[in-house]
Image (tube, rainbow, N blue to C red):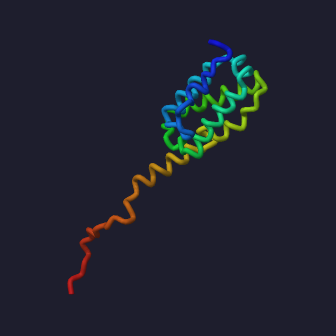
Amino acid sequence: MNENENILNNFLENRPIYLAYEDELKLIDIMMKLPMDWLIKNEDEFIEALNTLDISHTCGYGFLSVEESDDVIFENFCNWLREVEEKTHISVIGYIEDLSPEELELDIYRRRKKINSNKPDENEYQFDNSTDLELM
């Protein structure tokens, strides 16, 4: 890999600020494959891509698309960010709060969503099937 290759910028070029969820996953994959020395030499590009991911995931509601089976991807990425900070001294720990399924409390969101999906629609008319009607 060429040290000066703009791999993250090239990936993000022509993509909207709010990435599609699939693009978020691709960006994570690309980032995690980058060597630490590349991150150090291209810190601005790395932080810019991380900002795009963060904005997309939070303001763009990408986190709502995270399937429970994808939690491990984001957990691994957050662990990798800790490693990046430790090895490169690039300040990235602050991004974990917005990208971690645990920090975002996605399990609570999913439980509430499941409970609410099992409730009848409030606007839907409910028939009373009781048999204790009195006739006058």
- Can you name the residue that lies furthest to the right here? 89
Question: Which residue occupies 51% across, 38% down?
Answer: 66
**Residue at the farthest front position:** 14
Instruction: Identify which residue is drawn at 74% across, 21% down.
Output: 40
Vertical side of 9 occupied by 113: above or below: below
Front residue of 134/81: it is 81
Q: Nearer the viewer, residue 135 or 37?
A: 37
Vertical position of residue 57 compared to residue 38: above or below: below
Tell me how many marks there are: 0
Toward the viewer: 129 or 125? 125
Of the 4 image quadrants, the one containing the N terminus is top right
Q: Position of residue 61 (x, y in %)?
A: 54, 45
- Image vertical order of residue 126 relative to residue 43, above or below: below
**Horizontal and vertical percent for residue 52?**
61, 36
Q: Looking at the image, is 82 positioned above or below residue 97?
A: above
Q: Quick check: can you spot residue 107?
A: no
Q: Position of residue 100 (x, y in %)?
A: 62, 37
> Considering the image in quadrants, where does the C terminus appear?
bottom left
Residue drawn at point x = 58 percent, y = 32 percent: 74
Furthest toward the top, the residue is 1
In the picture as drawn, the residue positioned furthest to the bottom comes out as: 136
Q: Residue 87's image quarter? A: top right
Q: Residue at x 61, y 41 (%)?
A: 55
